[in-house]
Image (cartoon, helix red, strand yellow):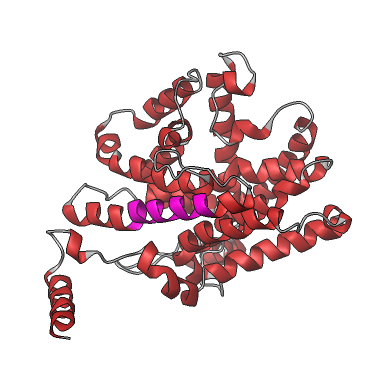
């Protein structure tokens, strides 16, 4: 019977073998998620590179809308999935501070100083309460992860998170402090990630899901092309209330549900095409935060340096060149040499700042201090 089943379903079994692979041993990175994070960060960089090309191009605007509909939701869902074990223990709080809070302070300051020059605003203040450009994600992830124990206790976490996101769109008084509007509106994606299990990801990696993803993405591009002159893609940015987008208040809750459904469908299609085996770019998935934060300086500077001024850049060949450049740039920024160069600010040890530092780390720090004193 087993042989018969293997003969009749040989192709299906071969196609689904990757999706049905056994769980990875504890401590071993899963190639699928590293691949997904790398591909998502490439799309983030490409989206930023396309932004100046949207004016006058309905096609670029449609592609831009589709990418923005799912690249950050995919990133946030995966972030939620890997936050399931967060329990506010001393070690995890330490990691939260060193891995998110410290980079937030450093890059918020760096982006402010850099854009004083590129935006010709020399008096732009350094404000840690008003995230600038890409730093909003660090502040949001810090808040989301801190609330993880709450969502693990709530009986209906996803409906509650959706209700919070819907209510946020009704209020224009949710100010820019820590970009709270965007934090609340993207919250359901993080909570969904907390609820997902390995079998849910295996479901979207089946051959049938990969096949269906093709017409779904094609339909999404067609719908986006139709929608470009009829609606604003800012609904997918989740940073403004309905009133700020010039829409009636009731649009906010409705569009929250609509965009959530559209984004999740496209996230599922995206994950369906993410390879599960190790590839040449798999190792780069561990450095996506480096690529995310560092590529922003080039994205901001490119406008100031006049890279988009030549006419050919706004033609199809320019779109291809800009896309390839963005992909290569962010790929380079995720590589081990770049990570080693910036690890001191992206993943600082800071053993001196925590009482619960591991014994070996404390001893190493003490030896370092003792050597400095003796020297």
Residue 46 position in % (x across, y down):
66, 55
Determine the residue positioned at 52% across, 48% down: 134
Q: Horizontal placement of 200 versus 213: left or right?
A: left
Q: Quadrant of residue 10?
A: bottom right
Determine the residue positioned at 42% across, 39% down: 192
Determine the residue positioned at 14% across, 80% down: 373
Residue 190 position in % (x across, y down):
41, 41
Question: Is residue 188 highlighted in magenta?
Answer: no
Is residue 277 or residue 349 the one in the foreground? Answer: 349
Determine the residue positioned at 54% across, 46% down: 133
Residue 307 position in % (x across, y down):
76, 59
Total number of numbered labels?
0
Q: Is residue 196 visible?
A: no
Q: Horizontal placement of 23 versus 42: left or right?
A: left
Q: Quadrant of residue 230?
A: top right
**Magenta region's main secondary structure?**
helix
Farthest bottom residue?
A: 375
In the displayed structure, 82 sits above or below 27; it is: above
Bounds of the magenta span? 99-113
Quadrant including the C terminus:
bottom left
In the displayed structure, 180 sits above or below 367; it is: above
Q: Quadrant of residue 263?
A: top right
Residue 156 position in % (x across, y down):
33, 28
Q: Is residue 259 visible?
A: yes
In the displayed structure, 42 sits above or below 277; it is: above
């Amino acid at each position: 019977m087993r042989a018969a089943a293997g003969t009749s379903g040989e192709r299906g079994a071969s196609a689904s073998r990757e999706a049905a692979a056994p769980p990875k041993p504890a401590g071993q990175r899963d190639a699928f998620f590293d691949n997904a994070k790398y591909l998502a960060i490439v799309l983030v960089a490409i989206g930023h590179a396309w932004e100046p090309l949207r004016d006058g191009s309905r096609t670029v605007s449609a592609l831009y809308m589709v990418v923005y509909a799912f690249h950050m939701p995919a990133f946030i869902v995966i972030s939620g999935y890997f936050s399931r074990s967060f329990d506010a223990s001393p070690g995890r709080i330490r990691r939260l501070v060193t891995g998110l809070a410290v980079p937030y302070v450093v890059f918020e300051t760096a982006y402010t100083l850099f854009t004083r020059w590129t935006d010709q605003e020399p008096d732009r203040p350094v404000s840690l309460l008003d995230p600038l450009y890409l730093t909003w994600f660090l502040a949001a992830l810090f808040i989301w992860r801190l609330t993880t124990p709450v969502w693990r206790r709530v009986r209906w976490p996803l409906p509650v998170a959706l209700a919070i996101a819907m209510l946020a769109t009704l209020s224009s008084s949710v100010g820019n402090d820590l970009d709270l509007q965007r934090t609340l509106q993207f919250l359901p994606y993080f909570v969904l990630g907390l609820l997902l299990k390995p079998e849910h990801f295996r479901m979207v990696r089946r051959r049938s899901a990969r096949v269906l993803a093709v017409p779904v993405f094609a339909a999404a591009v067609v719908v986006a092309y139709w929608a470009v002159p009829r609606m604003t893609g800012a609904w997918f940015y989740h940073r403004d209330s309905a009133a700020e987008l010039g829409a009636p208040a009731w649009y906010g809750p409705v569009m929250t549900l609509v965009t959530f459904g559209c984004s999740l469908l496209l996230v599922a299609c995206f994950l369906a095409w993410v390879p599960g085996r190790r590839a040449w770019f798999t190792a780069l998935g561990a450095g996506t935060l480096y690529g995310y934060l560092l590529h922003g300086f080039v994205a901001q500077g490119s406008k100031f340096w006049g890279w988009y001024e030549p006419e050919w850049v706004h033609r199809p060949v320019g779109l291809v060149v800009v896309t390839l450049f963005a992909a290569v740039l962010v790929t380079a920024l995720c590589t081990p040499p770049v990570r080693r160069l910036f690890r001191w600010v992206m993943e600082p040890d800071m053993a001196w700042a925590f009482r619960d530092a591991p014994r070996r780390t404390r001893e190493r720090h003490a030896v370092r201090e003792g050597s400095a004193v003796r020297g």
